[in-house]
Amino acid sequence: MYKEILISLDEREGRAVVLEDGQVMEILIAREERQVGSIYKGRVSNVLPGMNAAFVDIGLERNGFLCADDAAAHLGDEVNESLRQMSISDILKVNQETLVQVVKEAVGTKGARITTYVTLPGRYLVLLPSAQYIGVSRRILDEEERNRLRVCAEKIRPEGMGVIVRTAAAGRTEEDLQRDLDYLVKVWDKVQQSARKRRAPALIHQELALVDKVLRDLFTPDIDRLIIDNPVEYAKMRDKLEITAPALLDRMHLYTDRRPLFDLHGVESEVEKALNRKVWLESGGYLIIDRTEALWVIDVNTGKFIGKTSLADTILRTNLEACREICRQLRLRDMAGIIVIDFIDMDSADDQRKVLEFLGDELRRDRTRTHLVGMTELGLVQLTRKREGKDLDAVMREPCPVCSGRGRLLSAQSLAFRVRREILRLALDDRNEAILARVHPHTAIELIGVEGEEVEALERDSGRTILVQVDRHLHPEHHEVLGGPRNQLEARVTRLGQGHQVKVRLEEPFGPNIQSALAVVNGNVVEVLSGGDRLGKEVQVRLLRSTGAFCQAEIVR
């Protein structure tokens, strides 16, 4: 498999992608300082025994969340074990200063998740200042190599500290590990010095920028090529590689062509596709990917794929293909937390086992920790994936200002019924000679009805004059219904006279009648007859009919 990394940088944004055989597998986007991994000196602002947690002011927009276990983590395993039964109020006090590290970025209304258990990752090792044990990455499978690395780590481990040997350390010499460790110890010394000097809340140690993170975590010996389009960062990267991994220097290249690097490799279109709700499989099947407040949901469908032998074989092949694409999407979108997959139902227990085994094999290629829980009685597959920073969706999109992220709105018919009920309620008051409804054009069409029939019926039922005022800029779900003296409300409405000519823009069909087009003129909804085939154009129209709520017009040829 041919692996390469592309890095594109400018003054405001940095982006990196990992390609495997030309296919985009991971996308990293940096537009602001990274929080996860950063170390802060915080001040306890609130202690909540009922939640067994505390909120700590670390200088960000929202306070960090620190649970009791994380609050005692820096004291070591033995002390921490004795504190498990204690309340958070016995560990922390309001206004107490403490050194914390962000483990999960703030998401939505939730502040960052923080811990007192500080870790400092390097290229080959992770330094654990408050622990005293040796760990070796589970991804290093060779037992002899694991033992060798454990012995090396034990020899160089600083007194009173622990280290974890990372996957990239496989095959590296003791000198390589010592060089990495010396750097990490210097960083920790600077953190301690800065923490003693500064007052809370304060940023003590900033997690690495995009380029440094790529060098540390992604640019490993299994990467065949790295291309970057920024000459300044290219020079810095080469300087760092000469110290940490000189063998990788020949695989690094500076891109100087005028055509954008991501365009040349077709990455831009893949980035756009990475946000699609529907993901097509090569066979013709597809995935539907949705997120909720608590979890991600992935639904597998056969789509256009009809197979060649049997229904069971078609389902199995679709599910197996979906496994590979799902694991790609996990990495591509950086999906995290709880993930539920609804594969196509399989009657055969053997087929279910094949799908779970294949999914597990594909998940092992993910550098982010995942845990495959298994399949429920309903055939739903559950897994978890470690959350660190913001996922791609959170980085590139924001909640819709119209639907507030729900993805759906109340229908125009539902809103028209709601407005009608409010009108009838106001009509019970004898002081209301007339009632004015200010609504969105879509609601107005439903409220008025075909040629104004609904409004006429409403006037008969209520015994009041009903006025409809259209506001195109009104939120589709919002409306205003007012009652009062007729002369005052009519003064707020601009009447259109029969024969009046005006230039309008035809933007959409007039409700279900696709032959007509909708226009809004001075707060009046106008049905432009035979305008359905001229949508998006400006036309001159003549008013044929005008009532208190409904107008019809024809196009002046």
Image: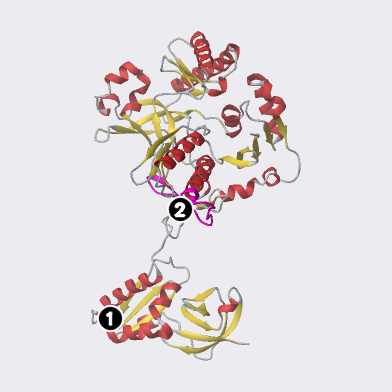
Tell me the residue at 25%/33% (across/down).
Answer: 49
Q: Looking at the picture, does residue 319 appear above or below residue 384? A: below
- Residue 69: horizontal and vertical position, in percent? 32, 27
Tell me the residue at 70%/25% (across/down).
Answer: 249
Q: Earlier in the sequence, mark 2 or mark 1?
A: 2
Tell me the residue at 30%/87% (across/down).
Answer: 460
Secondary structure type for disc 1 = loop
Magenta part of the chain? 287-314
Evaluate if marks 2 and 1 touch, with contact meaning CB atoms under 8 Å apart: no
Q: Is residue 495 visible in the rendered structure shown here?
A: no
Q: Amino acid at mark 2?
A: Pro
Q: Looking at the picture, does residue 367 appear above or below residue 324? A: above
Q: Looking at the picture, does residue 503 appear above or below residue 477? A: below
Residue 382 versus residue 49: which sits nearer the camera? 382
Q: Looking at the picture, does residue 40 appear above or below residue 382? A: above
Total tally of numbered discs in the picture:
2
- Image quadrant in which the C terminus is located: bottom right
Q: Is residue 321 visible in the rendered structure shown here?
A: yes
Residue position for label 2: 399
Q: CA distance from mark 2 to mark 1?
A: 40 Å
Residue 167 versus residue 548: which sits nearer the camera? 167
Tell me the residue at 55%/73% (across/down).
Answer: 507
Residue position for label 1: 432
- Residue 7: horizontal and vertical position, in percent? 64, 37
Query: Does 534 lie within the magenta span?
Result: no
Q: Amino acid at mark 1?
A: Asn
